[in-house]
Image (cartoon, grey):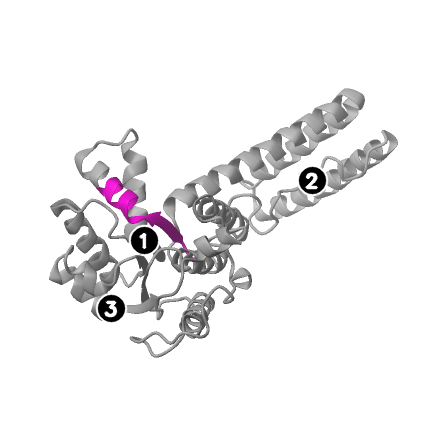
Amino acid sequence: MALDGKILRRARALHAAKKAQREAAFRQRRQGVYAKLPRVQEVDACLQETILETIHIALGSERAVNARLEEIGQKNQTLQAERSALLIQGGFGADYLDETPLCSACADTGIDNTAICACIMAIYRTLQTEELSSLLNLGEEHFDAFSLDYYDDRTIHPDFGMTARENMSMNYQLCAKYADTFGDKSCNLFLTGDPGLGKTFLSACIAKVVSETGFSVVYDTAAHVFSRFEEDKFRRGDDPEEVQGDVARYLDCDLLIVDDLGTEMTTSFVVSVLYNLINTRLLKKKKTIVNSNYSVEALSGIYTPQILSRLEGEYEVLTFFGQDIRKLKKGQ
């Protein structure tokens, strides 16, 4: 499972900010106690000295070390008891000045053993969902909200031998299963059909489910993907590091969703980028969903045989047909 480096950096920055806020709040709380109960500050200084003493006596003989450590331990317990009593007498809880990390698993380091801690991953998933939502309106687009009612259930399509509703039911079930079982063995998808038939909607549903399970998901339009590669190659972007980061995300994320393929201005550079993108992700065994208003056959007039061969051989094609759902909804 690959993590999106751009989002992971933001997650770590947010985690660090939360940690800094907690530490600042603790310092403020401690200063308030010290101002009211000066003796507590003196006790804390003595407790700190016991730590230094423990380090210093480690250089002595074993017998002397053990005896001294026992002495320091008793001193520490006495100071702790006095500290607790002072806090309670001052109207505070005995543990009021205990500095508790936000995450007990990693003590706010962000690392649990040698892995990224769950606290960082929780922030990561939230940020990823927010980024996808800004593009895909994930608050509304989920599988439970999908309706087959807008697809005709009477007319048999001459090329497919089924109604639009029957076809859409198959597409829906396949996409739902794809999202639920996403992993290394998942296939690539090519969603084709006229505008307004649900390609982007179902892609968004897949993105939502897959991202919530921790996989890195990137959605973008084909035109913007190609423009970012162009900015990276010719150094035209305002922020080269951000552009390079976006290109790396397109190539390395667990699931890339490219929308509206075929609507961009086609140049030799675009063709080269598309081949590199598709081929690199296939070699890395990264999964891709491509949405297009054009069929694979129709794209043969736009792209090279090498690209078409990979789309036909490495992608499962889902065809959408029927009436434009957006127009039907607008008519209601």
On the image, the x and y values in percent for residue 60 come to 56, 41
Q: Is residue 185 above or below residue 116?
A: below
Give the residue at x 31% y 52%: 260
On the image, the x and y values in percent for residue 207 come to 44, 57
Q: Earlier in the sequence, mark 3 or mark 1?
A: 1
Q: Is residue 307 above or below residue 13?
A: below
Q: Which residue is mark 3?
A: 314
Identify the disc placed on residue 236: none
C-alpha separation, residue under disc 3 versus residue under disc 1:
16 Å
- Quarter of the image for the N terminus: give it: bottom left
Amino acid found under the numbered disc labelled 1 = Val
**Mark in front: 3 vs 2:** 3
C-alpha separation, residue under disc 3 versus residue under disc 2:
70 Å
Give the residue at x 22% y 64%: 296
Tally of numbered tags: 3
Q: Which residue is mark 2?
A: 72
Q: Is residue 133 above or below residue 164?
A: above
Q: Which residue is mark 1?
A: 258
Q: Is residue 117 left or right of residue 263?
A: right
Asked whether the beta carbons under mark 3 and mark 1 sit within 8 Å of each other, the answer is no
Asked whether the beta carbons under mark 3 and mark 2 sit within 8 Å of each other, the answer is no
Give the residue at x 12% y 62%: 305
Q: Is residue 6 visible?
A: yes
User: Which range of residues does the magenta coloring cover?
Assistant: 215-229
Name the outermost residue toward the top.
Answer: 35
Front residue (pair 72, 169) = 169
Circle 3 crowding by C-alpha within 10 Å: few under 14, some 14–19, many from 20: some
In the picture, residue 39 is in which quadrant?
A: top right
On the image, the x and y values in percent for residue 213 come to 49, 60
Q: Is residue 32 left or right of residue 201?
A: right
